[in-house]
Image: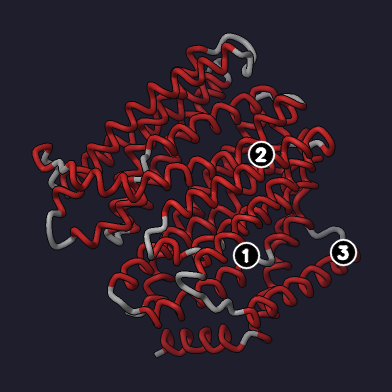
Amino acid sequence: MSIIKKLLGHTSIYVSSELIITAGGLISFPIITRFLSQEEYGTMTLIGITVAMIESLSCMGLNHSAQRFYWDYEKNKLSSFVTTLFLGSVFFGITGTLVAVLILNLLGVFDVFQGNIKQLLLVASLLVSVRVTTKAIGAIYRAKEQPFIYSLFAILSKYAGIGLIIFFLAYTLWGIFGYYVGLVVGELAVLAVFLFVFIKQNSIIPANFSPVIMKQTIAYGFPLILSGLTSVLMSGSDRYLIGYFLSLSDVALYSVPYNLCGYLTGILVSGFQFGFIPIIMKEWNRGAIEETHLEIQRVIRLYCCVSFPILPGLAIVGRNLIILLASAKYAQAANILPYIAGASLLSGLCSPLMIGLWFFNKTKTVAWLNLQAAAVNFVLNLVLIPWMGLKGAVVATLFSYAFLLVAGTMKSSALFRIMIPWKSVGLYFICTAIMYAILRVLLENFQEINLSGQVALGIAIYAILIYVFDGKIRNEIHTQMKRHLQ
């Protein structure tokens, strides 16, 4: 099986699971935004970002090391490798929960949160150990190229949390406290089942714990702690500054389109990243350098083809989409939705364009680049939010992701040069512009078309344009059709 076929196969599983997870998020999103006030939603956002930063730090980069080194140990000392990663992640996860309790309560002392919410902060802190352990197990399954098991438990974890969140919000008066109780209990229950399956399929023997392997994995993954942490800071520090300069209601007003965008673009970005990295790393380790070059170019083409029309699409349907999913009280946030989506889609290009840094284990360089981008983001937010309000935060986010992509690509190209398929990229840009213009004209003359009709019409127009003008995709479609008809 060729790399691209395997990539598409694994990506289809990851994308399908992300679609199912996103569907759950979209189901719960309007319920949560309606049950919680804007101040509560803003508080929930700030707690979530803080937990995510501590969670990122507590992973110690072991989830990245699982994908990097699994095939090195696949034929020798595999049990020791898996045991070391698992036990190390459990320890770091518990430590992270203790740190989260301390930091969240410290933020409460400085009146970052409104009211007495000590019990809420304690419950939210438990998410760190649950998620660090879940990520470690999931990373091992991804490294083993078993996307189905990973995706199954990701879906179960999401829906268990959602179900209990809705129950506590609808049938208790606990508000945001009920939200976190439901989230923790749901994810913890699924983790218990995940652990049972994992331990049954893998030899976890404490005596096989290897300090040497732990040192190797931390040495590789430790710089990626900063990388992961700065990624969270880059996507979340603006919320702290919005809360400081503006209000918790403004935090909510900014977070709703940000979270909605995460649901929509996350399907594409996560699907490509989860499917792309393990397969390419495996081929690189086999020495198939020329084939690796070609397949990375194909990944870039496919990503651009799918991602480009999302931005103008959100510019057209964004307001109606936010009103439908989050209620009219968040309608004014539609103006910033396409720009937030643009930043998210730019981040998705970092994996293929910066792959050389991963090939040559330049994780310190990755961490340094992310740290620089986070610093740029923070400084721009510090300057622009007081001046431009929420639009300043959007500009800062978009510019910082562009900075990371350009700087990372330049560093990576010095090690592993990738020929970007500019002709195809330009074609997709032109097709997107034509689609946007046609859709605008049609909607101005047929205003009765509803939201679902607008989305379907945009997809149809773009698909026709791509089929007509992109010979490579057209030939691939014909090949697949002939294969299925035989």
Query: Which residue is found at the position 61% from the left and 48% from the top?
Result: 373
Labels 3 and 2 touching (C-beta < 8 A) = no
Depth check: give the residue in front, 445 or 115. 115
**Which SS class for mark 1?**
helix
Residue lying farthest to the front in this orientation: 414
Work out whether residue 152 can be spotted: no
Count of picture labels: 3
Residue depth check, mark 3 versus mark 2: number of the one nearer the observer? 2
Across and down, in percent, residue 74 comes to 18, 60
In the visual, does 216 lie left or right of 96?
left
- Residue for point 59% across, 44% down: 26
The residue carrying mark 3 is 446
Question: What's the distance in space between the residues labelled 3 and 2, CA to CA?
Answer: 44 Å
Q: Nearer the viewer, mark 1 or mark 2?
A: 2
Check disc 3 and report its element: helix, strand or loop.
loop
How packed mark 3 is, by other alpha carbons closer than 10 Å (few <14, some 14-19, many 20 or more), is few
* Amino acid at pointer 2: Phe
Name the residue carrying label 1.
307
The numbered mark, 1 or 3, whose residue comes first in the sequence reads 1
- The three-letter amino acid code for the residue at tag 3 is Phe
